[in-house]
Image (spheres, helix red, strand yellow):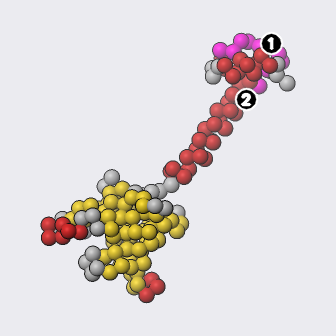
Amino acid sequence: MLPLDCFAALAMTQDVDALPRLRWNGTLERIRSFVGMRRLVCVLSALCLSAPALAQQANGLWLRDNGASHVRIAPCGDALCGFVAWVQDPERASEIGLKVFYDMKPSGPGTWEGQAFNPEDEKTYTGKMVLEGDELKTSGCVFGGLICKSVNWTRLK
């Protein structure tokens, strides 16, 4: 068992070498070991607590694979929504601000399910988003997933 003044010295300094040379048999080594373990536990705790923050997020600005539009995906309530942010064709400028993905809720790691609106045919489909790195695949399906159309997106921001 360590004397109380050793714990006080340990609490007051991060630099173990600054501790006075203790003459108790192995006490200094035990203090060094304790400080090393404490640092290891702190680092591991920080990594574990930050794991949700490291999870893949679909938030951001996305470029459609054909270059015709950008979509901004952002939280809306407890889900994600996607809005048209830019269109290449000036005749489709009225689509800017249109919600094309809504109620997209997590359904697994890097996947969300909800609704997808297609401005080209003005229909709403069962939607799914799958994120892999900076690539996002969105799909809209009908007839319980029997017929689906997918679009690939690349993260811009």
Q: Which residue is mark 2?
A: 34
Real-space Cα distance between discs 1 and 2?
Answer: 17 Å
- Residue flagged by tag 1: what amino acid is it? Arg
Mark 2: secondary structure: helix
Give neighbour class at mark 1: few <14, some 14-19, many 20+ (Cα, 10 Å): few
Q: Which residues are magenta?
A: 18-30
Dominant secondary structure, magenta: loop
Q: Which numbered disc, 1 or 2, marks the residue closer to the eye?
A: 2
Residue at 32% x, 57% y: name it. Answer: 61
Q: Residue lying farthest right?
A: 1
Q: Secondary structure at mark 1?
A: loop
Q: Which residue in the protein does label 1 denote?
A: 23
Circles 1 and 2 in contact, beta carbons < 8 Å:
no
Residue type marked 2: Phe
Task: Determine whether 45 is above or below 95 in the image.
Answer: above
**Residue drawn 37% across the image and 74% down it:** 116
Q: Residue 75: tell me if it is visible.
A: yes
Of residues 89 and 14, the one drawn nearer to the viewer in this rendering: 89
